[in-house]
Image: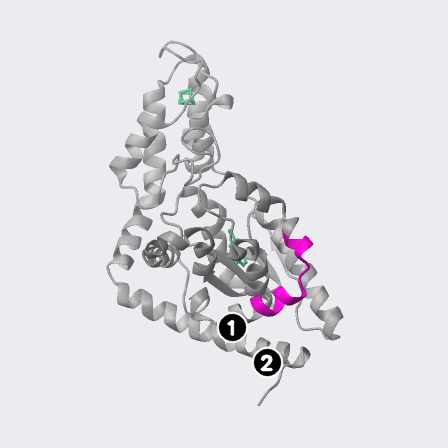
Amino acid sequence: MQRVLSGVQPSGSLHLGNLVGAIENFVKLQEQYQAYYMIVDWHALTSKFDKSEEIQPAIHEVAATFLAAGLDPERATLFIQSQVKEHAELHLLFSMITPLSWVERVPTYKEKLQNSEADLGSYGFLGYPILQAADILIYQAHKVPVGEDQLFHLELTREIGRRFHFLYNTEIFPEPQAVLTQVPKVPGLDGRKMSKTYDNGIYLRDTPDQILHKCTRQMLSDTARVRKTDPGNPEVCNVFTFHKLFSDSETVNLVAQECPRAGIGCFDCKKKLAEAITARVEPLRQKIEDNLAQPARLDAILRDGSDRARATAQATMARVREAMHLPTL
Ligand code: TRP
Ligand code: SF4
């Protein structure tokens, strides 16, 4: 069975975009692959070293959400990066063979350095993609489900793997390939990409009332439609984009038909949307809250996953050390 691996930052509340873009896909992949899903707390530290107390609760939130979405911890290995110290060792060894120019040319690096509010001028942040390469290659992963923003990191991962093979005349790491999801991006309430940074999200822990409020009061619609008697244009309306993602086809067709002839008002249209989103989110929310109420159970699952992950990582490291002629006493 091929291995699939991905990493998720523990950075607070997960939203609808995370659910549709990543989490549901991860859950599906556990059926066809040997799946490893890692909560990357060390990566979170690269930007949150001064708010490290926020990371542990966020780890539980990620775990609670994955389990609520159907991740089966027997089938898939759900674990915490920092519980498998071998990642740090491989990161160190990879830093020896990775030319500085490779990490400096990562397109997101300079941009993030300049635009982020966090102080990213550290040595650790420059090494972020090298740590990610270690995360992936240590499990000899074949497939890596990620967003498009991660493609360059994956390319770098392959290059580091090739360089390792060339330098030490070995073949340890399969070349990991990205798995891009087909789902369209979920916009935010304001029409930009749904993102925690923009504070424009519908969160998986939002209550039905909060969802109703966000849909009816905060979500941008066709701005050209001022009065209820004005015809609207669903094609330029953010609310309609949401309907296409979350409502049944009957509702989508109704809105498509009635909105352009002012047969439905925006408030009613948004209320229908809130119902559709709530139907999707509410069962999940209750499971997330149940899971969060049992922190010891979450820890046990994460401990067990980390133990299994470590066994795999240790086997790879034995080969890596041998290939690099490191002493074994
Ligand atoms: N950089 C990834 C992100 O921000 C997180 C990540 C860390 C990751 N290690 C990984 C993703 C390994 C895939 C595989 O989303
Ligand atoms: Fe948008 Fe719905 Fe209003 Fe039409 S009725 S403009 S689709 S919110």
Q: Which residues are magenta?
A: 91-103
| Residue 146 image point, x, y percent | 55, 51
Q: Secondary structure at mark 1?
A: helix
Residue 100 forms part of the magenta stretch? yes
* Disc number placed over residue 196 in the picture, else none: none
| Residue 139 image point, x, y percent | 56, 69
Up the image or down, 283 lies above or below 192; here it is below
- Name the one closer to the observer, 304 or 68: 304
Report crowding for label 1: few under 14, some 14 to 19, many 20 or more residues within 10 A (C-alpha): many
- Name the one closer to the observer, 310 or 74: 310
Residue 222 forms part of the magenta stretch? no
Give residue 272's quadrant in the image.
top left
| Residue that protrudes farthest toward the bottom in the picture | 329
The N terminus appears in which quarter of the rendering?
bottom right
The residue tagged 1 is 86
| Residue 199 image point, x, y percent | 38, 36
Q: Secondary structure at mark 2?
A: helix
Q: Residue at x 43, y 17 (%)?
A: 223
Horizontal side of residue 18 vs 144, given as left or right? left
N-terminal-most mark, 1 or 2: 1
Q: Residue at x 57, y 68 (%)?
A: 92
Amino acid type, residue under disc 1 in the picture: Glu
The residue tagged 2 is 318
